[in-house]
């Protein structure tokens, strides 16, 4: 055993250089509660829910911002700590007019507050009073609900926008009960630097930020199921969890463990999923007859395509034919396209729009 050890709830455990007490406790299966913490962000130390006792410290310390040092004696779940956390939770929940809410369609982390409220049997009745944050539910953008009445000022949205997206589209105005998450000059999101990546929605632990498109499916029958997949829009290969209710796609969450994206998505991957079941989506081939598109069978359509290719090759030669495969198509289809062009027409004129 190396010299880097601490005593954690009575057990001697090792830690790596730079690890926080929260990191060490989590690695050893301890469920220290957090609210302002997001693995991808610099620890902030705002909510104090992750407090632990360290022998020699007069007061509990925030484990997410305290680096482990050799010989520390740490306790994570004493009666006094749990009482302290319950009081903190009661204070936080008192900020939410309708209490903590469980709604998986608002965003990926949107149920964190609700689950902790259940764990600590916390309601806001002891601390009824002022609340911070005024909602901007009239913001006309079609993607992100800004329901700041439910904001607890954890600043995860502001930090993810700056640290992960590098966008700085949102910030914090004022302090105390006047705290307000805002854009520059307090305007609408679409007039700000926002790229609608949805990162803020997915990290918000209360559902104060919500995915408007997903939320339209609150009354769609069925339980929400998650299926791991890859975003089909470009060649990066971001991992996503597709949310469905029965046969209906009801949302997309970024995969935190996706090797290419580590929880990030762009606007298309995050919000551009409802075309899958759009009523205008083509479901049968169309061929042009007398200048108009009419529905056709696949055999009719493929015959027409073959005639067209043959005519071009006859008139202009094999190099007059080329193909650009769609970045939305799966790899197997992209492979088939290049095989079709190379083997079928003996030319290498083939590309893919997601090649970059
Ligand atoms: S959607 Fe992305 S860019 Fe826009 S405010 Fe949220 S994190 Fe920032
Ligand atoms: S909107 Fe959500 S993520 Fe942002 S500060 Fe409020 S509670 Fe935290
Ligand atoms: S999670 Fe450590 S202070 Fe909020």
Image (cartoon, rainbow, N blue to C red):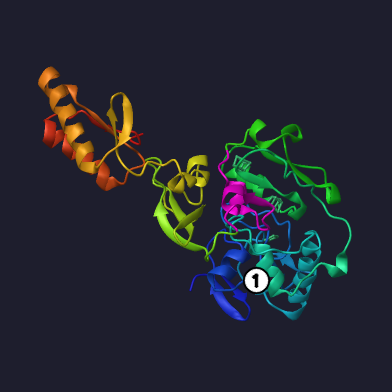
**Observer-nearest of 320 and 355:** 320
- What residue range appears in magenta? 196-218
Q: Is residue 14 above or below residue 265?
A: below
For label 1, being within 8 Å of ligand 3 is answered: no
Q: Give the quadrant of residue 158.
A: top right
Residue at the (81%, 64%) spot, across then down: 91
Residue 306, image x, y percentages: 16, 33
The x and y percentages for residue 79 are 75, 80
* Percent of width and height locating residue 320: 18, 21
Work out which residue is located at the far front of the displayed protein and give it.
290
Is 202 contained in the magenta span? yes
Q: Is residue 202 shown left or right of residue 300?
A: right
Q: Nearer the viewer, residue 225 or 123?
A: 225
Asked whether residue 52 appears in the rendered view, the answer is no
Q: Which class describes the residues within 10 Å of circle 1: few (<14), some (14-19), or many (20+)?
A: some
Task: Relative to 7, say whether 262 is above or below.
Answer: above
Q: Compared with residue 258, is residue 353 higher up or lower down, i.e. above or below?
A: above
Among all residues in the image, which is located at the extreme top? 316
Q: Specify whether 236 is left or right of 196.
A: left
Is 255 drawn above or below residue 285 in the view shown?
below
Q: Residue 120 occupies which quadrant of the picture?
A: bottom right
Quadrant occupied by the C terminus: top left
Magenta-span inclusion, residue 147: no
**For the point 75% across and 52% down, which residue is it?**
153
The residue wearing badge 1 is 72
Q: Is residue 15 something that shows in the picture?
A: yes
Q: Say which residue appears at 19% left-offset and 25% top-offset.
A: 321
Q: Quarter-wise, where is residue 285 in the image? A: top left
| Place of residue 168 in the rendered image (x, y in percent of width and height, measured from the top left) | 64, 37
Number of numbered markers: 1
Does dot 1 land on a helix, a strand or a loop? loop
State the residue in front, 6 or 99.
99
């Amino acid at each position: 055993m190396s010299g880097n050890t601490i005593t954690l709830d009575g057990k001697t455990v090792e830690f790596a250089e730079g690890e926080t007490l929260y990191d060490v406790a989590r690695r050893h299966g301890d469920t220290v509660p957090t609210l302002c913490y997001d693995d991808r962000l610099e620890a902030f130390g705002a909510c104090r829910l992750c407090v632990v006792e360290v022998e020699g410290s007069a007061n509990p310390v925030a484990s997410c911002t305290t680096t482990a040092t050799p010989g520390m004696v740490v306790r994570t779940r004493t009666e006094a700590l749990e009482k302290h956390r319950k009081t903190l939770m009661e204070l936080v929940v008192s900020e939410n007019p309708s209490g903590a809410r469980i709604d998986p369609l608002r965003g990926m982390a949107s149920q964190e507050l609700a689950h902790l409220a259940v764990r600590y049997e916390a309601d806001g009745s002891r601390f009824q009073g002022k609340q911070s944050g005024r909602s901007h539910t009239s913001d006309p953008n079609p993607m992100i609900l800004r329901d700041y009445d439910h904001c607890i000022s954890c600043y995860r949205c502001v930090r993810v926008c700056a640290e992960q997206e590098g966008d700085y589209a949102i910030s914090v105005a004022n302090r105390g009960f006047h705290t307000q998450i805002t854009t520059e000059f307090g305007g609408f999101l679409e007039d700000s630097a926002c790229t609608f990546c949805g990162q803020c929605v997915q990290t918000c632990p209360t559902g104060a930020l919500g995915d408007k498109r997903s939320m339209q499916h609150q009354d769609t029958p069925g339980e929400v199921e998650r299926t791991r997949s890859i975003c089909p829009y470009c060649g990066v290969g971001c991992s996503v969890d597709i949310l469905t209710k029965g046969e209906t796609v009801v949302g997309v969450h970024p995969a935190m463990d996706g090797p290419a994206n580590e929880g990030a998505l762009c606007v298309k991957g995050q919000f551009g999923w409802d075309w899958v079941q759009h009523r205008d989506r083509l479901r049968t081939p169309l061929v042009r007859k007398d200048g108009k598109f009419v529905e056709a069978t696949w055999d009719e359509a493929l015959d027409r395509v073959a005639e067209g290719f043959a005519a071009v090759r006859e008139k202009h030669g094999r190099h007059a034919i080329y193909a650009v495969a769609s970045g939305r198509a799966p790899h197997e289809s992209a492979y088939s396209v290049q095989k079709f062009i190379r083997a079928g027409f003996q030319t290498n004129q083939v590309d893919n729009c997601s090649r970059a």
